[in-house]
Image (cartoon, grey):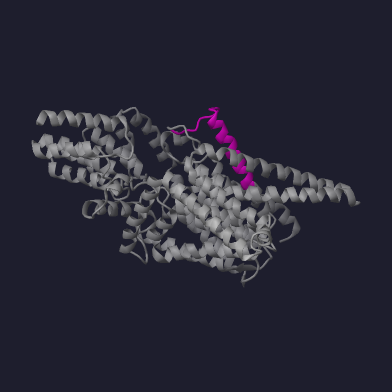
Amino acid sequence: MARETRDIAYPIAFTGFILLVMTILVIDPDRMNGLTLAKYFWFYSTLLLTGVITFGLAFYSMSVASIDITKSIMIGILTVVIIDISRYSNMEMMNAKIFLLVIISFFFFDTFFHHYKKATKIFQFVLIAFALLEVIWGYCQLYAYIPDMQKDFTLSGSLPHTNSYAMFLAITLPIALYWTITLFQKLKYGYSRLLTEADEEHVRLEIIDDILLFLLSALGLIGILSILPFTGIPSAWFIAGCSGLFVLYFKLNLHSFIKASILRSHKKTAISGITLLLVIGLLTTGFYRSRKDEINEHLLTWKISLQVLKEKPIIGVGIGNFRKAFGDAQTIYFEQGEPTEQEVALAGNPNCPVNDFIQLATGTGIIGILLFIGLIVSVLFSGFRNMDKHPEKLAITGALIAFILAGFINSPIQSLSLSILLVLLISLGTSDIQPARKRIPKVIPIMTSLLLIGITTTIVYPQFTMFKAYKQWAHGRLYYKMKIYATAAKIYAPLTNTLRHPYFFMEYGYALSQTGQHEESIAILQRVAQILPDPQIYNRIGKSYQALGEYQLAEQYFQKAHHMVPNLVYPNFLLAQLYLEMGLRDKTLECARQILTLKPKKESEETLHIKAQMEQLIQRLD
C-alpha cells in the first residue's frame, strides 16, 4: 500500500473501529421503556462500516496474509454457530445471530491490527478511557446528577445492568494497573534521560506524552477501585483483585522476591505453604458463609444444566434455546425428582442467565465448548509465551483472566458490550505474534472479507427494516404501562408479522387477555412459552383458560408455573382460587396451607398479603 494511501486509510480505519468499540458507551434511552435498541443498531451500523474497511485493507494491502491457531479455532466456532442457526430459529434479541456477528467482528479486528500494529497499544488506552468515562457516569448516577434509567436506582453507567457495569470495570482494571506501573517506571527513567541526553526537545515531548498517558491510566485505575464497592457486586471485587494480583506478580517480578526471601529453605517454604493454605481456606470459608445461598443456587443451576447437556451432548440444544431447555429441565426436576428443601427454597427463575461455560456447553455441545476453551487457552498461552518480547501482553492476559473468572461466576457474554470487549481482547492478545503463522494467498482474505460482509449484511439489513416497528412498540408500551390495554393491543396487532422479540409477544398476549380476547392471548403466549421459561407466562395462559372455563388446562398451566419455581407463592395462590371456583374444598385448603408454609426467596408485601388472604380463606372453609 502506497504511503499516500496509508495516510488516508489509517485515520479512516482507526475511526471505524473506534466507533465499533464505542458500542460499549452508547446510551440507550429506550431502556426506560424496557427496550435495548440503541446499542444493537449502533453495533449493526458500525459493523458494516468496519466490514467495508476490512475489505479495503485486504484488497489494497501489499503485505502477505497469514493464519494462526487462534484464527483457525475462530473459524471452527463460526462454523458451529452457522450450523446452529440453520438448525434453529427463535425470537431472542441476543441469540445465535448476534453471537455470529460478534464472532465476525473478530476477523475485522484481526485484519485491522495485522496492518496497523501500533493501534494495539492505542486501543488499550481507549479501553482505559472508556472505563474512566464509565466511572464518571457512575459517580454522576451515585450523586443523582444524571438518571440511571433503572427502577432500583443502581449504578449501571451506559451498560444495561449493574452486573455488566461492574464486570466491565473489573475486566479493564488489569490494563489500567499495568500501564500505570509501566508509565511510572518509564517516567522515572525518562527524567534521567532528560538530564543526560543532548536531544532534550525530543525527550521532553516523549515525556509529555507519557505523563498524559500515565494520568489517564492512574485516574482510570483510581476511579475503578473507588467506584467498584458502590456497585454492590462482590464477584466483581474478587475478579478485579485476582486479575490485579496477576499483573502485579509478573510486573513487579514478585517471583524473584518470593524465591529469594521465602523459598530459600525447606522450612520457610513449608511454613509459607501452610500459611497460604490456611489463609485461602479461611477466605474461602468466610466467602461461602457470607454468600452461602448464592453459591448453593449456582450449584443447583449447574446440576440441572448437566441434565440438559446429557440430552444432546455433542451438538447441544442451540445457542438461543438454552433458557427454554433449562426451564423444562428445572420443571421436570422439581416435579418428578427428589429435590431437597434447600433446593426448593433456592430455585430461581430459569429465565435468569447462568455462567457462560454452562450456557456454551449446553447450547453448542461438547464440540462448541471445546473450541471455546481451546480459543481461550491458545490466547493465554500466546500471551505467556510472548510476554518477554511483547510485555504489553501482560495487561491483555490479565484482562482475559478476569473475563474467564467472570464467565465462571456470571454470564458476561450475554451482554453485547462485554462480548465486543472479549473479541477485542482476543484480537489484542494475538496481534503481533508471528510464530506458527502460515502464509496464505492474498485472494483468500479478499474473498473471506467479502463472504463475511455478505453474512453481516444478510443478518443486519432485516434489522434496519424493523426499526420503525420497534419504535411503534415503544409507543404502544406507553399505553401498556398505563394499563390502557385496548389501545396497546391495537398498536401491537400489526407488528406481530415484523417483530420477533419474546417480550413484545408477552405484552401483546397479556394485553389481549386483559381485554377479554383469551383465545388469541393463549395462542400468542404459547409461542412465547417455546422461547422463554418464565412462570409468569404459564400463569397468564392459565388465567385465560380459567376465564374460558377450561379448568383442567388452567390447572395444568398453574402447576407448570409452580413446579418451574416451587418457592413462588403466586402460582399456588392462583391454584387455590381455581379450586375454590371449581368447588373443590379439600384441594383449596391443601393449596392454602401449602402457601402458608412456603418460604419465598424474598418476602414482599404481595406475598404477605396473599398469605393473609389464605389464612382468612382457611378460617372460612373450616
Magenta region, mostly helix, strand or loop? helix
Q: Is residue 167 magenta?
A: no
- Of 307 and 264, nearer the camera is 264
Quadrant housing residue 583 = top left
Apparent side of residue 452 relative to residue 14 in the rendered image (left or right): left
Quarter of the picture holding the N terminus: bottom right
Q: Tell me the residue at 43%/63% (across/down).
A: 368
- Residue 325, position as x, y percentages in the image: 31, 55
Quarter of the picture holding the C terminus: top left
Query: Which region is colored magenta?
Result: 126-150
Apparent side of residue 483 relative to residue 256 in the rendered image (left or right): left
Q: Check the image and report above or below for 480 versus 389.
A: above
- Of 92 and 69, nearer the camera is 69
- Residue 511, position as x, y percentages in the image: 28, 34
- Count the labels in the image: 0
Q: Tell me the residue at 23%/32% (across/down).
A: 611
Q: Is residue 182 visible?
A: yes
Apparent side of residue 567 relative to residue 316 in the rendered image (left or right): left
- Residue 411, position as x, y percentages in the image: 45, 50
- Residue 318, position as x, y percentages in the image: 37, 58
Q: Residue furthest right?
A: 198
Q: Tell me the residue at 17%/36% (across/down).
A: 592
- Of 552 and 448, nearer the camera is 552
Q: Is residue 547 visible?
A: no
Quadrant housing residue 22 = top right
Q: Tell me the residue at 71%/56% (across/down).
A: 6
